[in-house]
Amino acid sequence: MDKCLLLCLLLFSSYSHVSAHYYPSKNTLVSSVTKNAILPIFTFTLNTNEEYFIHIAGPFLVRSCNDGLPRPIIPCGSATCALTRRLSPHQCPPTQNTIINGRCACQATAFEPFQRLCNSNQYTYGDFSMSSLNPRSPSLTFNNVKYLCIPKPFLIDFPPGVLGLAGLAPTALATWNQLTPPRLGLEKKFALCLPSDTNKGAIFFGGGPYKLGNTDARSMLTYTQLIKNPRRLNNYFLRLKGIFVNGEKILLAQNAFGFDGKGDGGVTLSTVTPFTTLRSDIYKVFTEAFSKATSDIPRVNSTTPLEFCFKSTEHFQVPQIDMKFADGKIWKVIAANSMKKISDDVACLAFLNGGDAAAQAVVIGMHQMENTLLEFDVGRSAFGFSCSLGLVNASCGDFQTKP
């Protein structure tokens, strides 16, 4: 039996007898997560019925504001306004402040990744609420939450009902950080489980427990280090050491996954990139290894944007892909996450060629993260990942999202 599957089964079964009623009451914030049918995004709920899309590289909470009402001013000379400048998306020009009623009001800039638009507007604050797993406090309201107030044209292509963007970057002004004050016993971390289909997923702010049936799914997590890139403050980076196909390491340049002098390169994660994207030099060697390992499977025509497609049958099997980190921890990518089913008899390798000038060496995309519990423990600079929940006959929809 595969070591990853065996470990997941052992951890799952050893904790499954613990009743959910025995968990201590904690103010863990929680929401169900929905996979959008129009755009490749995942959303969760704030303020009871407002949907925000999850952007783990977004530095700010961004909200659509079209009512014309005045909002509180954050002074231009404040520490908060200075911080927005440090976190401004690198794709956008410098932000200019504005004057409101004779006062200098802070403005900040957001980058919309689908239209690739930059937009600056008032940076302000207000009240936001989110559900909690504590039955004594099923909803918590937070005052003076800072957010970027953006007019609707910036979000014109967003699906109906999506009011804004919840930036979850490793920054002080990110949504998760503002909603996890230590006075409430909340830790500086968040976790998410992105659904692979129309079922719901889950997102947690402030630490566990992450109740999967009668199991605390924290027991299923393997941890590796989160590293920082001073040139890309809004991204989470991992220290990847090697990629394996069918147990064999692909041969790459020694520093293929490292940063260059300009801060480009490295291995990051994205909730706006549908499939894992590899820089050309990595993609070429990786796909050659995958093609060799699948030489006995009939190939079919490619399906844009996926290049390597195969005829799938009832007993269709493809090699496992492993990502090995510098500390020896291994993230195993099984067929459900490495392949994208196109039709009943066609499946494609769900990895893309990012080109020679790709900003990062590897961007781990949404398809590879689906149906897997991921924890971003920013306080400890640690990244936790489970095996695919399908291996234990579970899914992201099985997480408890109500007290």
Image (tube, rainbow, N blue to C red):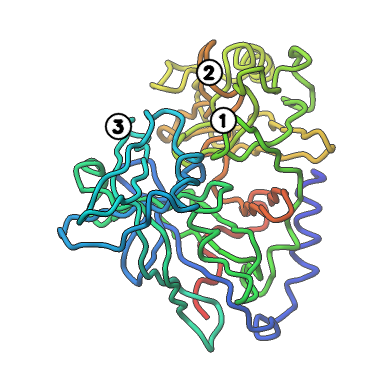
Screen quadrant of the N terminus: top right
Q: Real-space Cα distance between discs 1 and 2?
A: 10 Å
Q: Real-space Cα distance between discs 1 and 3?
A: 19 Å
Looking at the image, is 119 positioned above or below residue 186?
above
Out of 146 and 324, give the one closest to the viewer: 146
Q: How many badges with numbers are in the image?
A: 3
Whichever of callouts 2 and 3 sits on the residue coming sooner in the sequence is: 3
Whichever of callouts 1 and 3 sits on the residue coming sooner in the sequence is: 3
The image's mark for residue 363 is 1
Would you say the residues marked 1 and 2 are in contact, meaning their CB atoms lie under 8 Å apart? Answer: yes
Looking at the image, is 257 positioned above or below residue 325?
above
Query: As drawn, is 65 to the left or to the right of 198?
Result: left
The local secondary structure at tag 1 comes to: strand
Q: Amino acid at mark 2?
A: Ala
Out of 153 and 351, give the one closest to the viewer: 153
In x, y percent, where is residue 29?
A: 53, 70
Sort mark 1 into few (<14), some (14-19) or many (20+) by Cα contacts within 10 Å: many
Whichever of callouts 1 and 2 sits on the residue coming sooner in the sequence is: 2
Q: Residue furthest front?
A: 102
The local secondary structure at tag 3 comes to: loop
Sort mark 2 into few (<14), some (14-19) or many (20+) by Cα contacts within 10 Å: some
Residue at image location 63% in from the left, 33% down from the top: 230
| Pointer 2 residue | 358
Q: Amino acid at mark 3?
A: Gln
Q: Real-space Cα distance between discs 2 and 3?
A: 19 Å
Residue at image location 30% in from the left, 32% down from the top: 117
Q: Amino acid at mark 1?
A: Val
Looking at the image, is 78 positioned above or below residue 126?
above
The local secondary structure at tag 2 comes to: loop
The image's mark for residue 115 is 3
